[in-house]
Every structure is written in structure tokens, then in C-alpha cells.
Image (cartoon, helix red, strand yellow):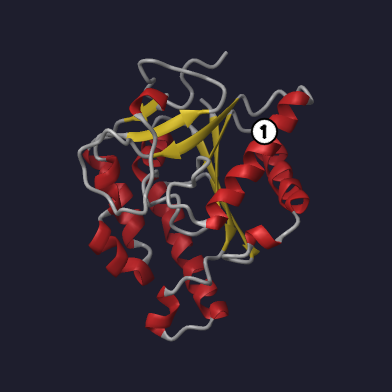
Amino acid sequence: MGRILYIFPHPDDESFGPGPAISKQRRAGHDVYLLTLTRGEATRQREKYGYSKQKMGEVRYREMQRVVDVLDLTELEVLDLPDGGLAELNPLDLETIVTSKIHKVRPHVVVTYPTHGCSGHLDHLVTHAVVKRVFCAMKAEGAEYPKRLAFFTLDNASPVERPEHLRGAPRSEIDCVVTFGGDDRRRGEAALQAYETYRDVVEAHRPLTTVSEGVCFVFFGETYDPPVGDLMAGMS
């Protein structure tokens, strides 16, 4: 079995789309690790509850602990970098953090956002750039891991409606589609429900409808046509 490391900037990034795939990966016996760079404290949702940034970060951290149980994550690490402020940090410091985590986990596959970050959020774009830079540097140094870098994305050819600000990839660029059944969908929905402070957002946008035909990934530097069905497929 393999080790998969998801690296995202905010709480709920792992559940607003990838959740059912993570559930399936765990049931298949893969170890799934999640590194979340911030506590998501700057979200405007905090205004609805009258929370300070510190309080919102604490609440969202506790919500993530429930996601660990729902998705059966092998390990969760949540950092306390500034939500909405990753672009203001020294990218070399971010690269050091990501590199250290990769050396600790020794994953076969690292997953993060694509170039456009799906939503265009600046923290998403920074995370993509940092993770890709670290992957390329480790490859150049001859590291044995990770063997693959994958970007979670949406399928532009899908007929399912989605919020206008979300972007995806042409079907021709999608290298992996992880399809899932009812049990994994239910776990994905339960992971979303763990974020009680985002309940109205989840109900309004129903994020898992955007991945109803499968959770899609683009592989960096690899092409699979037709797409494979597992992040571990095709690796030597």
C-alpha cells in the first residue's frame, strides 16, 4: 500500500471535493496524511458568529479533529500560519516547512491545488507554487520520494453546475479520476458536516455535486489517456 500526503492551506480544503477519494483511499489501505497550513481564522464566516480571528481559528481546528475520525486520516497536522497572508511570507520558509513534512512522511504521492488554485484564492496559488517548487527540487536532488505530484481539480467537461468562481481542467488534461460509491460519498458528506461554522455554505453550494462523476487529478509531468483510477496507478 502507499502513502499519500495532501497539502492544503485551509481547513475544509480536503473536504470540499477530495473527501470521498480520501475515504476510498483509506479503505483501500493507503496511508493518508493531511498538512493544513493555516487554521482558516480570517474567513468572513467568523463575522456571522461574532468570533475574533483567534476564536475562529480555535473553532475550525476543533472541527478538523472530527474530520480525522470521519475520513479515518492517518495523520493530521494543522499549522498556524496566517490565513490570507501566505503570500506575505518568505517562500523559502514555506518551502522548508513543506520539505520537512515530506521527509517525515516519505509519501509516494503529494497532492495539492493546481496552478489556478481551483478558486483563485491567493493562499491556494502560493501553496501550489511552494509544493511544486519543493517537488522539483527534491527530484533534482535524486530523492526517492515523492514519486508523483498530483493536483486536485474539477472537470470542465462535467455538466454539473458549479459556482462561477471555480475553475477546473479540460478533460484531456485529467490523468486520474477516482470514482466512489455510496459509503465514500456519505463519509465525504459527513466530513463537510463536521465544519459546523460552514453549514450554510455547504448547504448552498453542495460541494460534492462538483465531483459526482469522480474526484479528478492532474499529474505533474505525466500523461495518462485514458485516466487511471487510483493515485498510485502506473508508478514504478
Query: In percent of the image, x 72 and y 42: which residue is there?
Result: 99
Quadrant occupied by the C terminus:
top right
Query: In percent of the image, x 53 and y 52: which residue is there?
Result: 124
Residue 22 image point, x, y percent: 41, 40
Residue linked to disc 1? 135
Please state which amino acid type lies under the numbered disc 1: Phe
Q: Is residue 6 above or below residue 50?
A: above
Residue 96 image point, x, y percent: 76, 47
Which is nearer the eye, 219 or 121? 121
- Element type at mark 1: helix
Which is nearer the eye, 201 or 196? 201
Q: Is residue 60 above or below residue 133?
A: below
Q: Is residue 50 above or below residue 56?
A: below
Query: In percent of the image, x 47 and y 83: which residue is there?
Result: 51
Crowding at dot 1, Cα within 10 Å, few <14 / some 14-19 / many 20+, comes out as many
Residue 175 image point, x, y percent: 42, 24
Residue 157 image point, x, y percent: 27, 33
* 167 to the left or right of 73: left
* 160 to the left or right of 140: left
